[in-house]
Amino acid sequence: MDKERVKEYIVDWYHKSLPDLIQRDITIPSTSKIVTLIGPRRAGKTYILFQHMKKLLSSGIKKNQLIYLNCEDPRVSSLQAIELFEIVKIYWELYPHAEKEFFVFIDEPQVIPKWESAVRMFHDDEMKIFISGSSSKLLSKEIATSLRGRSLSYLVLPFSFSEYLKLKRRSYDLYRLGSKDKAALMNSVDEYLEFGGYAEIINEQDTELKTKIISEYFEIITYKDIIDRYKIKNTRLIQWLLKSSISSGASELSIRKVYLTLKSQHLQASKNTVYDYFSLLEDALFIFPISRHSFSERKKDFSINKTYINDNCFMKIVDSSKNIGKKMEQAVFLELLRRKRPLSHIFYYKNVQANEVDFVITEGNKPTQLIQVCQKVDDITTKQREIRSLIKAGSDLNCKNLIIITEDYQGTEEAKWFDNKGKITYIPLWKWLLS
């Protein structure tokens, strides 16, 4: 370890002012457990750590009781796990403190081999630990096995619609919404559906530059979070799978069909490689698969998954952003993921007659809400198709909470399909996102 470089890093951190922040809806609790923030790159995990630091400082905690370790900083990234503990000792030499509490914030620790052993030492010494990372294995493998129930994990996604409005400094009184405000709000929804929730993209005014940033984010995820991280040689295949995932977003994605398509296009890959590569896209938190609902765990495991991507902006990569219905469904899924409670699950429904419902929300194994996403319900054929699937699913799953999220239609209607009846609530997307 180069102590002079480490000291330089520490002094830079100590004298650095925390940036001005837009308050995110995620709040880090006061707990003795290790807190882990997991999410896609550039989703705002580091800023949530800074948000919590500011909260601690405003409560009377002193700066010399906090240390921030950015493991992707070249002065830190080459260190061994045990040397992370040495950094804290050097920090105490430079900035002594007599207080009992000490807080360690660690960004992207997975770049350091066996990082979890250092975190365990911090925790055993009764330090308060906060971790952020862009690999889901941070949650599954290292934390589940090495930190043995000592952590609480939170998913961080790009900005929600309410956070988007906060960042844009736009506010609306939903109970007294005039025509002018309504038009402005609908325009905000359209903008959010098209360009998504990444803060840098939201703040950029020029449309061409927004698109350029999206392309750069896609390249960073492709190379830094997948190809470089996992030493992938078949870069063409990864790029193809990423774009295929975007094209297939909000619909069923059969790995077998993907494999057959690859063969027809003379892209060399075994079926196992395709499965492995898709798991890497999931690990990088670029895709989120959900399975078909069934009361049989075996059928859930063997169902064809529907796949969603981590932000609407990437639909521009394959020019699928003109599909408003798909963009709406994408936004609804991501909001459901933000609102997901510890024992709740998100599935989709499809019966043997191919009646499909976009989302089945369960608490434990009990379906509590069925959600259909439909842009327009003024076409009677479309409306009847959505109602038929929802009513049938409500009967099959014994769930009466039936919702259709629309572009702008709202109301409540009693509906019937043969012997099945139900009350359906229609709610506009903007209202649901802000509820």
Image: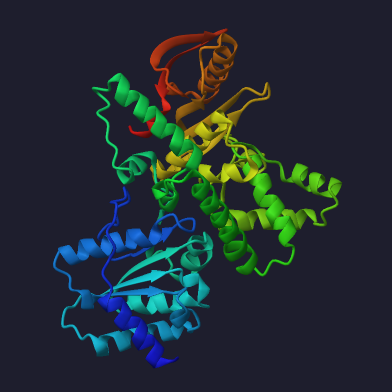
Q: How many marks?
A: 0
Give the percent coordinates (x, y) of residue 381: 60, 11
- Residue at position x 39%, y 75% in the image: 120
| Residue for point 33% across, 62% down | 49
Q: Nearer the viewer, residue 176 or 101?
A: 176
**Nearer to us in this view, 397 or 96:** 96
Q: List x then y, in percent, for residue 83.
A: 42, 86
Q: Nearer the viewer, residue 122 or 1?
A: 1
Question: Looking at the image, is 360 positioned above or below residue 287?
Answer: above
Residue 263 appears left or right of 391: right
Residue 289 seen in render: no
Quarter occupied by the N terminus: bottom left
**Is residue 256 or residue 381 the one in the foreground?**
381
What residue is drawn where x is 44% and y is 82%? 75
Q: Quadrant of the C terminus?
A: top left
Q: Is residue 339 visible in this depiction of the protein?
A: yes
Instruction: Give the quarter of the image for residue 218.
Output: bottom right
Question: Residue 92, how many percent across, how many down?
Answer: 26, 86
Residue 94 versus residue 174 in the image, above or below:
below
Horizontal side of 151 relative to 53 (left or right) equals right
Location of residue 21 with respect to 362 vertically, above or below: below
Give percent across and percent down for residue 338. 41, 44
User: Relative to 72, is 153 above or below?
Assistant: above
